[in-house]
Image (cartoon, coloured by chain):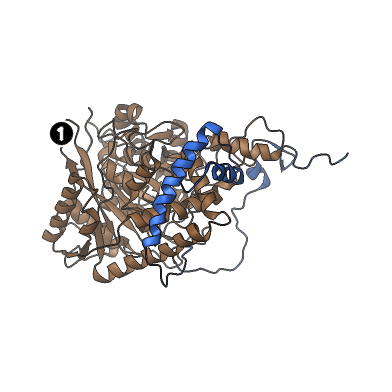
Amino acid sequence: MSAAREAWRLPATALAARVRAGELSVAEAVESGWEGPAAQWEAEVHAVAHADAAARAAGAAAAQRAPRPGPLQGVPVLVKDNLCTTDFPTTCASRVLAGYRPPYDATVIRRLRDAGAVVTGKGNMDEFAMGSSTEYSCYGPTRNPFDLERVPGGSSGGPAAAVAYGLCPLGLGSDTGGSVRQPAAFCGVFGLKPTYGRLSRYGLVAFGSSLDQVGIFARHAGDAAAAYAALAGPDPHDATTRLSPAPDVWRWEHGVRGLRFGWPANLWREGVEREVIEGLEEAAASLERAGAQRVPFDFLPGGYAVATYYLVATAEASSNLARFDGVRYGFRHADSPDVRALYTRTRSAGFGPEVQRRILLGTYALSAGYYDAYYLTAQRARTRIRREYQAAFMRCDLMMMPASPTLPFRLGEKTEDPLAMYLSDIFTIGANLAGIPGLTVPVGLAAGNGRPPLPRAVQLLGPDDSEPVLLAAGRALEVRGDEARLGREHETEFAWPTKQ
Amino acid sequence: MSISRDDVRKIAELARLEIAEDRIERMARELSAVLDYAASLGQLDLQGCEPTAFAPAEAPLREDGLDERRLTPEMALAAAPEAEQGFFLVPPIVENLNP
């Protein structure tokens, strides 16, 4: 087996090192994932919304020509279809943006390219990032590579599934209420949602602007750290980015010895699957063996965050999605006698049912007579929720909790019950409301009873700018010990899905 | 139910969406379920909680400046469904300008 054909198995940092050493060309690094795993998986999993071999080759050639190779030299990345790219369509998996090609690259895309990485395609998603299963896509659903009868989570299910089956070692998604951390849990990969304002949102199609944050998928904690280091930092094109330099993930030298992790066990006393709790217990014991200390306390139940979120996020969405009217980009309804009919017919034919549902909900929450009762109350609840996290982080360095109350569920299981789908985000939404960072860490597979083994995961949450601590703890869980620090060579085997 | 069928018709008009008559009942039910769930916020003590519009970050101020990467009119119009002579083209907005 030649090195080039097996390149897709490598961690991103190791792949980049081989490209920089001249052992692999950028094109070989990029195509390895398409020739091996994608040929085997993609037809059934459907992680990719837009593939284009010519655009890919052009991207690889541009990286190969770069005068100075970067930290992600030659690393292929599948990016969610709501991040603007000049060389691939950007449609948010919606008919309303059919065929749209943006005239500019999102800042995170630009920084990926500056670091030597190559956009390998656009990942499937729930339309406009509204969903938790990647079933609400105009291109059809993505399936979970660990069990094709089950969903990969969402809304960034395409990049999560692609990183899991081996198309590429890194993926980019967006996380408004858990859309990176929940699919990462369902697909058994790392999923980092940075502190609000650390990754630029310029060129990320807006959903809930006060909640949206670009997030990172990776098979290894060190790869997530490398991507964060390449992408984070102020951007003059996004006034909500923080001006101070992003924390340096490589300077964390302490491992997890002495780290205090919060353990809010009241949150999983009911409504959480047994396998999820077993994963938590194992991860907590593993961190304790590495020298960390468990700090039990009760925390505000996640239901309040869900209630707050579905008022705030839908209100912001109803406003942000007003721009899709058939005038400037994408789809236009062909038969409209006047401009008002043009707006209404374009939007009604262009948006799918879940997007329409959320626009209506947000319109209601913002409408005269209901604003105080719903939107204003939700904004005040948001303040309370942020304070709850701040108080918790006086007692601990990070908190551990599930990323999702369940293992991956079956296709179609929740599409007919919007509220049930929303409750799938009960553990992730709080971080978006509070603006804090979170990391999903895979912790092995749950053996099946008449079904294939499914990924288990835990979620770590920390205060603003705690990404170095979260990633160090994620690394400790990955190697099941304190010794291998981020950036230090220590090969770990990823728990790959097996073909059924 | 928090939301009536008439409410659905009204907010659909505000949002420039057309909801078919046979979908209105179901939409009212689904939206009501979420709003009823949101009513749980009434149990939360919000004494002293001012509204948060954005997750607090540093509020950066900067000098005005021109962006060297600004869009040209051609780039801005390139993705339009219909454009003509440097303008986006839309159906009539005002009727009978010349009666």
* Residue A145 image-quadrant placement: top left
* Residue A378 image-quadrant placement: bottom left
Q: Chain of mark 1?
A: A
Where residue A284 sits: x, y (%)? Answer: 16, 56
Q: Nearer the viewer, residue B86 or A206?
A: A206
- Residue A94 seen in render: no
Viewport quadrant of the C terminus of chain A? top left
Residue at the image position 38 percent from the left and 56 percent from the top: B40
**In the displayed structure image, the side of residue A255 where residue A87 appears, left or right:** right
Q: Nearer the viewer, residue A498 or B29?
A: B29
Q: Nearer the viewer, residue B71 or A443?
A: A443
The kind of residue on which mark 1 rests is Asn
Relative to A248, does residue B34 appear above or below in the rendering?
Answer: above
Where residue B6 sits: x, y (%)? Answer: 56, 43
Where residue A297 sits: x, y (%)? Answer: 21, 65
How many numbered markers are drawn?
Answer: 1
Chain A pictured colour:
brown
Q: Nearer the viewer, residue A155 or A205?
A: A155
- Residue A160 seen in render: yes
Chain B pictured colour:
blue
SS at mark 1 in the image: loop
Where residue A470 sits: x, y (%)? Answer: 27, 59
Relative to A380, does residue A65 appear above or below in the rendering?
Answer: above
Residue that label 1 marks:
A449
* Residue A5 image-quadrant placement: top left
Viewport quadrant of the N terminus of chain A? top left
Relative to A192, does residue A453 appear above or below in the rendering?
Answer: above
